[in-house]
Amino acid sequence: MAVDVLTTADGRVKTALSHQHAATWFASRDAGKALEIGNAVPPMQPSRPEKPELLSPRDVPRRRPGSPQGRIALLHAVAHIELNAVDLHWDIIARFSDEPMPVGFYDDWVKSADEESKHFNLICDCLEAMGSHYGALPAHAGMWRAAEDTAQDFMGRLAVVPMVLEARGLDVTPGMIQVFKQAKEAKTIEALELIYAEEVGHVAYGSKWFHFLCGRNNLDPKDVFHTLVRRYFHSTLKPPFNEEKRAEAGLPPDFYWPLADETPRKKRT
């Protein structure tokens, strides 16, 4: 089921499959008999539609959010993030199936993938209401880099994707909501507020299972987190941080502030 989603290109079709497979999983759980966790070979990169054109981050045009065109560009970027998140959550299920995990691990990431699918469609609906659509603008080509870099490192994946990248969403989403409040875009405000609320859970799942693996291997979570973020995250952690929501998701300040205080690191060649 995970690979089925990952190898589907069209965003609306991908998310429909994601919803369908999530429903199948939870129906089996409700019946008291979880589906067997098999083995699969997920693609190194998920299938993507022909549009949007994927560009280097430095080449993606920047638009001010004060204009309708700027708000469309902002939403387009959010849609791209959400589509990548759908694939990231199915990928962690398929890619690390050789590591025996409690069934609750699969509950959490199937639920997250299902919610990210809803988020993608909500933002696409907002774009279409504004006269645009996903694929109308170029998008960031580096979104999948963290997945590629951590393809052989389960704990590295948990550290970098939910605990760094998704945690960053908790920092920046309130500002995005404010942009659309000023523009009186009620439908978009509603969508972003729902996404904001549910993303806390996704970060929390990352923290929970990262700590689980650290406990299984008698490792100090904070030290391991710092090591893995330094190894795999090719940027710096930038304040301001949403410390309240990060704490709610199980991320204490001593996990991220020491990394933010470091001087910028050179990118690996």
Image (tube, rainbow, N blue to C red):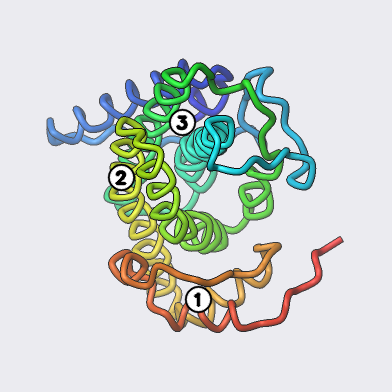
**How crowded is the residue under tag 1: few (<14 C-alpha within 10 Å), some, or many (20+)?**
many
Residue 80 is at least partly visible in this image: no
Q: Residues at badges 3 and 2 in contact (C-beta under 8 Å)? A: no
What is the x, y in percent for residue 82? 48, 37
Tell which tag, 3 or 2, sits nearer the viewer: 2
The circle drawn on residue 256 is 1
Residue at image point 51% right, 80% down: 257
**How crowded is the residue under tag 2: few (<14 C-alpha within 10 Å), some, or many (20+)?**
some
Residue lying farthest right? Answer: 269
What is the x, y in percent for residue 25? 28, 31
Tell me the amino acid under the disc marked 3: Ala
**Quadrant in the picture for the N terminus:** top left
Q: Residues at badges 1 and 2 in contact (C-beta under 8 Å)? A: no
Residue at image point 27% right, 24% down: 24
Q: CA distance from mark 3 to mark 1?
A: 31 Å
Vertical order, 104 against 163 (above or below): above
Q: Secondary structure at mark 2?
A: helix
Vertical order, 169 against 122 (above or below): below
Q: CA distance from mark 1 to mark 2?
A: 24 Å
The circle drawn on residue 1 is none
Q: CA distance from mark 3 to mark 2?
A: 28 Å
Residue at image point 62% right, 25% down: 47
The circle drawn on residue 2 is 3
**Quadrant in the picture for the C terminus:** bottom right
Q: Secondary structure at mark 1?
A: helix
Left or right: where does residue 168 sit relative to residue 32?
Answer: right
Q: Which residue is mark 2?
A: 193
**Observer-nearest residue: 141 or 112?**
141
Which numbered disc flags the more N-terminal residue, 3 or 2?
3
Tell me the amino acid under the disc marked 2: Glu
Q: Residues at badges 3 and 1 in contact (C-beta under 8 Å)? A: no
Q: Secondary structure at mark 3?
A: helix
